[in-house]
């Protein structure tokens, strides 16, 4: 796993953008913010491309046994703390040795009245609201919510699969380590942050830094997508006959 400290990444970014002597116009704090934004964008890109290696699961918890509003046909649970995207919602249909986790289907808002019944297990989930701003005076976002259809009185355990938010990088002390997998992840982050620097400096003409950095970022992205597809396809080595003789081959 390729890694760099925040201090290293800031130095790399200054080198890529040719701003080593511009610490007043481009402060370490601002460059660190660009790097944070680019790291978050990369993780969203990887997840959208089908890579699951950045996802996490919430701690198992019990579903409510009644709807949040009398007469409604759904249950409701909180958006996981620190999540920026929900990728899956599983419920446990048993207990002990007979337990089995079952994935719920992601629903559309138009299907919200298609599910009724309180004795069976839930079938689908729907994001009701993201964490959001309610009033200008709020110091933090209000909690998001996920609906589960149909309502059930079983109190089954559930887990949510989500993409966690990438933490804010700090220029000082700058010792925080950032993972770059095979190195291309950090290359993408650096070129994406360089695009931000060039945009601030109005270098968005056809042959300037903006265009060159954007083109290099796209080339690196192509390599990343190819490599993560290989990782996603990787499977165990299992016995399989080939050409009449016994051999070990990797299944896909």
Image (cartoon, helix red, strand yellow):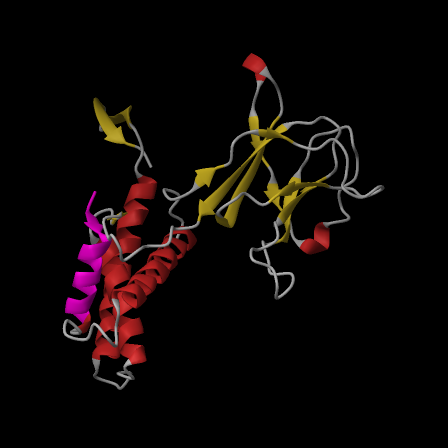
Q: How many marks?
A: 0
- The residue drawn where x is 57% and y is 14% is 96
Residue 121 or residue 85, whichever sits in front: 85
Residue 172 visible from this viewpoint: yes
Which part of the image, by quadrant, shows the C terminus?
top left
- Specify start and end residues of the magenta stretch as a single range: 1-16
The answer to whether residue 235 is left or right of residue 145 is left
Vertical arrangement, residue 224 with respect to residue 91, above or below? below
Q: For residue 14: magenta?
A: yes
Residue 94 or residue 180, whichever sits in front: 180
The answer to whether residue 125 is left or right of residue 55 is right
Q: Quadrant of residue 243?
A: top left
Q: Quadrant of residue 19?
A: bottom left
Q: Residue furthest top?
A: 97
Vertical arrangement, residue 215 with respect to residue 220, above or below? below
Q: Quadrant of residue 13?
A: bottom left
Picture coordinates of residue 199 (x, y %)?
31, 78
- The residue drawn where x is 21% and y is 42% is 1
Secondary structure character of the magenta stretch overall: helix
- The residue drawn where x is 17% and y is 62% is 12
């Amino acid at each position: 796993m390729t890694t760099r400290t925040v201090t290293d990444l800031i130095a790399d970014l200054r080198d890529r953008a040719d701003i080593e002597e511009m610490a007043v116009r481009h402060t370490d704090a601002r460059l660190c913010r660009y790097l944070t934004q680019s790291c978050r964008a990369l993780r969203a890109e990887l997840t959208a491309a089908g890579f699951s290696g950045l996802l996490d699961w919430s701690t198992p918890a019990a579903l409510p046994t009644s709807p949040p509003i009398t007469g409604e046909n759904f249950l409701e649970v909180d958006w996981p703390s620190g999540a920026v995207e929900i990728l899956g919602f599983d419920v446990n249909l048993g207990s002990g040795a007979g337990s089995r986790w079952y994935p719920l289907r992601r629903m559309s808002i138009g299907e919200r009245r298609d599910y009724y019944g309180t004795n069976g297990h839930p079938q689908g989930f729907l994001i009701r609201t993201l964490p959001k701003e309610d009033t200008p005076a709020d110091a933090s976002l209000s909690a998001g919510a996920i609906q589960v259809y149909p309502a059930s009185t079983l109190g089954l355990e559930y887990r949510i699969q989500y993409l966690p938010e990438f933490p804010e990088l700090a220029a000082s002390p700058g010792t925080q380590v950032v993972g770059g997998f095979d190195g291309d992840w950090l290359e993408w982050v650096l070129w994406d942050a360089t695009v931000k620097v060039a945009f601030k400096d109005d270098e968005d003409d056809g042959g300037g830094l903006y265009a060159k950095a954007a083109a290099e970022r796209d080339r690196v992205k192509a390599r990343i997508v190819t490599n993560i597809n290989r990782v996603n396809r990787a499977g165990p080595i299992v016995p399989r006959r080939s050409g009449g003789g016994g051999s070990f081959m990797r299944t896909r």
